[in-house]
Image (cartoon, rainbow, N blue to C red):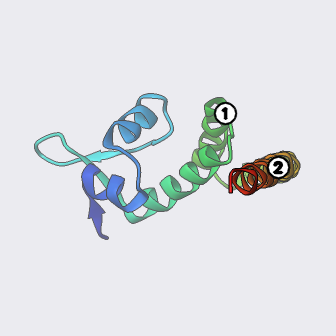
C-alpha cells in the first residue's frame, strides 16, 4: 500500500498542512500511522476518507457532524443506514444553499448590469 506524507497529502488535496493537523486534533482522522521519526503517514484509504472530509467541509457540513460521520465509519457497516440518512440530509442542505446562491447571484447580476449602463450613459454624456 502506498503512503503519503503530510505535505504530499496536503498538496494532493490542495489544503494546508495545518488543516490536516487540525482535522487530526478534532478526531477526524482516526488511526493515523506514523513513521519511525513520528511523522504522519496517510494510507490510500485515509486519502480517500480525507477527500470525503474535504468535500463535506467545502459544502459547509459542521465539524461536529463530520466527526459523527467519521465515528460511524469506524463503527463499521452497522451504521450504513445512519450514514446514508446523513448524506441525504446534507445533500438537501447543499441543494438549498445552491438555490439561495443562485437567487443572490441574480441580484449581483442586476447591479452589474445597472452600473454598466450608468457608466455607458455617463461616458456618452461626456462625449
Label 2 sits on a secondary structure element that is helix
Q: Measured from the top left, where is residue 84 in percent x and y?
A: 80, 54
Q: From mark 1 to mark 2, how far is it between C-alphas?
A: 37 Å
Q: Measured from the top left, where is residue 88 in percent x and y?
A: 84, 53
According to the picture, the residue beneath numbered tag 1 turns out to be 62
Give the quadrant of the C terminus.
Answer: bottom right
Residue 71 position (above or below residue 77)? above
Within 10 angstroms of label 1, few (less than 14), some, or many (20 or more) residues? few
**The one of 127 and 46 positioned closer to us in this rendering:** 127
Residue 80 position (above or below residue 26)? below
| Residue at the spot 49% in from the left edge and 62% down from the top edge | 48
| Residue at the spot 60% in from the left edge and 54% down from the top edge | 55
| Residue at the spot 80% in from the left edge and 50% down from the top edge | 105
Q: Measured from the top left, where is residue 22 in percent x and y?
A: 41, 32
Q: Is residue 68 visible?
A: yes
Label 1 sits on a secondary structure element that is loop
| Residue at the spot 42% in from the left edge and 57% down from the top edge | 13
Horizontally, residue 43 falls left or right of residue 111, namely: left
**The one of 44 and 7 positioned closer to us in this rendering:** 7
Q: Nearer the viewer, mark 1 or mark 2?
A: 2
Instruction: Give the mark nearer the N terminus: 1 vs 2.
Output: 1
Q: Quadrant of residue 12?
A: bottom left
Residue 76 position (above or below residue 71)? below
According to the picture, the residue beneath numbered tag 2 turns out to be 114
Amino acid at each position: 500500500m502506498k503512503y503519503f506524507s503530510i505535505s504530499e497529502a496536503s498538496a494532493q488535496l490542495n489544503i494546508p498542512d495545518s488543516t490536516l493537523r487540525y482535522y487530526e486534533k478534532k478526531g477526524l482522522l482516526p488511526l493515523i500511522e506514523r513513521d519511525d521519526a513520528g511523522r504522519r503517514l496517510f494510507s490510500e484509504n485515509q486519502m480517500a476518507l480525507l477527500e470525503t472530509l474535504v468535500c463535506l467541509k467545502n459544502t459547509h457540513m459542521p465539524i461536529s457532524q463530520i466527526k459523527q460521520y467519521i465515528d460511524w465509519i469506524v463503527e463499521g457497516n452497522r451504521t450504513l443506514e445512519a450514514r446514508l440518512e446523513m448524506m441525504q440530509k446534507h445533500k438537501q442542505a447543499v441543494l438549498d444553499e445552491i438555490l439561495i446562491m443562485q437567487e443572490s447571484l441574480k441580484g449581483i447580476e442586476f447591479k452589474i448590469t445597472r452600473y454598466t449602463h450608468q457608466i455607458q450613459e455617463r461616458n456618452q454624456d461626456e462625449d
